[in-house]
Amino acid sequence: MANAMKSDLPDAIRNIMQTNHRNDTPGINESRSMKMDRTWIRATQFSDEFTSLKDVHDHVYLHGWSATYTWWVHHGEDFDVDIVEFGEDENVPTYLGDVVNVEEPDNEDGHDSVEMIADLYTAVQQDGEQPMFVKVLEDAKHALCPDSYDKAKKYLKELGLGYELIDVCDNNCVLFRKGLEKHDMCPKYKESRWVDGDAAKWIPKKILRYFPLIPRLKRMFANKATSEETQWHKDKRVAVENEMTHPADGLAWKDFDAVFPSFARDARNLRLGLATDGFNPFGNMNTTYSMWPVLVKVYNLPPWSCTATSNYIMALLIPGPKSPGKDFDVFLQPLIEELLKLWEGVSTYDAFTGGKFDLRAAVLWCIHDYPALGVLSGRITKGYYACIYCNKDPLSRSLRKKICYIGHRRYLDKTHKWRRSLAFDGHRENRGEPGKLSMHETSECLEKLKDVTPGKADGTKKRKRGQKDKEPKLFSRRSTLWDLPYWKYLKLPHNLDVMHIEKNICDALLGIILCLEKNTDTVNARLDLQDMGIHPDLHLEEDEDNSVSMPAAWYSMEKEERVAFCVFLKSIRFPYGYASNLTRCIS
């Protein structure tokens, strides 16, 4: 078979060269409509640069011809030519020196290159061997390149890189999945899921975009280098006492390994982190829209890899226009289901060891700002019990226009002199440090909220300003994260993004010392000082014409000092992305 193919090669190559030459000759267009016979083609590689007939001849002898190059657009063939393929009873020639049986895809039945890629990728996962997937992609880079956005999405979906569209009730009470796919009405509020109401155009009111997590995590182990990096935290990390160079040096990681030694035994088991926050995708065009992405980070990788943006995994894209608020758990349902499977173990091929293993993964913590803490965890982050460390014994105090948190001297030593001082809030501090909630107390709080359901509230009464609840209310709902069997054992389930905290504190301090128009040193703040009986030098003063004036504070700068301060800030050179333009902040 191979010898027969070799004997056909010179004539075929000569025909190609002559055809390409005629196409380049002005006035000769016969090749545009000629009938080209390609029944002899069967090869593995193709190079689209040739200098002579001898070079082409030698190249085809050595490497063969690309099986995916069936339309000779690089050799002068137009798109409207007749193609002569193998007949039904014809013997198909094989690769040089090989004997294989390959059937041509039947495009009329809908089988195209998209399904071919899916089959090849499935072979990688199931067989655990190095297939010809990479070679096929290299050979067919011209034929497989998508020519439209829709086709590109089909490729991504077949490769496991796509996403699922899940319709959501407009009241955020249910996802139309798991038996509700064909329902047109919300089962709770009996409202239509469609924009037009009668499902004439099948346009849903709200869509959740879900990116499956398990295929992406399994793909990390299909590459030898990445698979080896997932074990860096245990095999190559050098721990230094009193230094934290990797999340594995933290107490939260070590405590989790101590509680679940079977999970820690295999270094390939992944430690994950969830990050979320709301953002406006329309910039300044629409300031009321809020969309919430949920990102997953893998902390097994080295520090330079786990912090790279290319290793962030998009899990959910929660639609707006409003923040999901207490209904956030509805959107987390598909992600939680996958996390439960990952905790039990998912069969995965490891390219580094050449075998299969049960991949497990666990979420060690979440990263967000303080408002998103209440959205994700269900904790109360507003009002008298907003502090998650004070719990049932808060440091909050009601002032004229706001609730103030000013009991921080409780964390000082019992004999500290500041505890006896009246300069802070007009009182001496004799209370001890607030205690933490035990696991039993937390379970009791969550048990009282088991009947709280997502969706719009029915007849909820708002609490009046200044009115405290009869008993402490620390949670607004039971978060779906508690469904994870390991969640109650986590030492640090929630991390606050310090960027927002640092920015807000910095803005407040700069506003006060630079006497900016927007600052917290207001008339109401001076009245609060007067009510507490502290800092009499800052109290409001009544003038002769019965007007009131604010005396200048000792910490505010004069004009010359403000200019010198701004000149100093301008002279500092920060790394790119670490500081904003000063001229945009100060007028």
Image (cartoon, grey):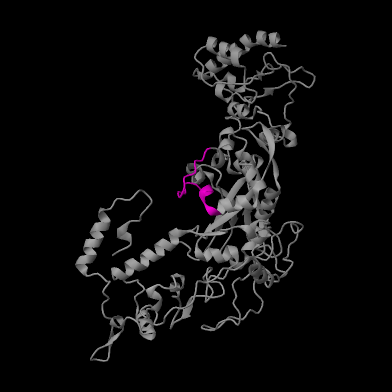
Please, what is the dominant secondary structure of the magenta stretch? Answer: loop
Give the quadrant of residue 543: bottom left
Residue 42 lies in what quarter of the image?
top right
Q: Is residue 11 left or right of residue 402?
A: right
Asked whether the viewer can see residue 276, the reply is no
Q: How many marks?
A: 0
Instruction: Name, please, the residue furthest toward the front.
Output: 415
Residue sitting at 58 percent across and 58 percent down? 491
Q: Nearer the viewer, residue 329 or 207?
A: 329
Q: Tell me the magenta residue range.
A: 236-251
Magenta residue check for 238:
yes
Q: Nearer the viewer, residue 210 or 487?
A: 487
Residue 445 horizontal/vertical position (percent)? 65, 71
Q: Residue at x 51, y 12 (%)?
A: 52
Q: Residue 429: horizontal and vertical position, in percent?
A: 44, 78
Q: Is residue 496 magenta?
A: no
Q: Quadrant of the N terminus?
A: top right
Depth check: 391 or 546 in front? 391
- Looking at the image, can residue 489 be seen? yes
Q: Nearer the viewer, residue 120 or 12?
A: 120
Percent coordinates x, y for residue 49 in the rendering: 51, 20
Residue 10 in percent (x, y) is at 61, 9
Quadrant containing the C terminus in the rendered view:
bottom left
Q: Is residue 67 above or below residue 363?
A: above
Is 587 positioned to the left or the right of 377 in the image?
Answer: left
On the rendered structure, is 444 left or right of 246? right
Q: What residue do we see at 63% from left, 21% from top?
A: 44
Residue visible at 54% across and 63% down? Answer: 372
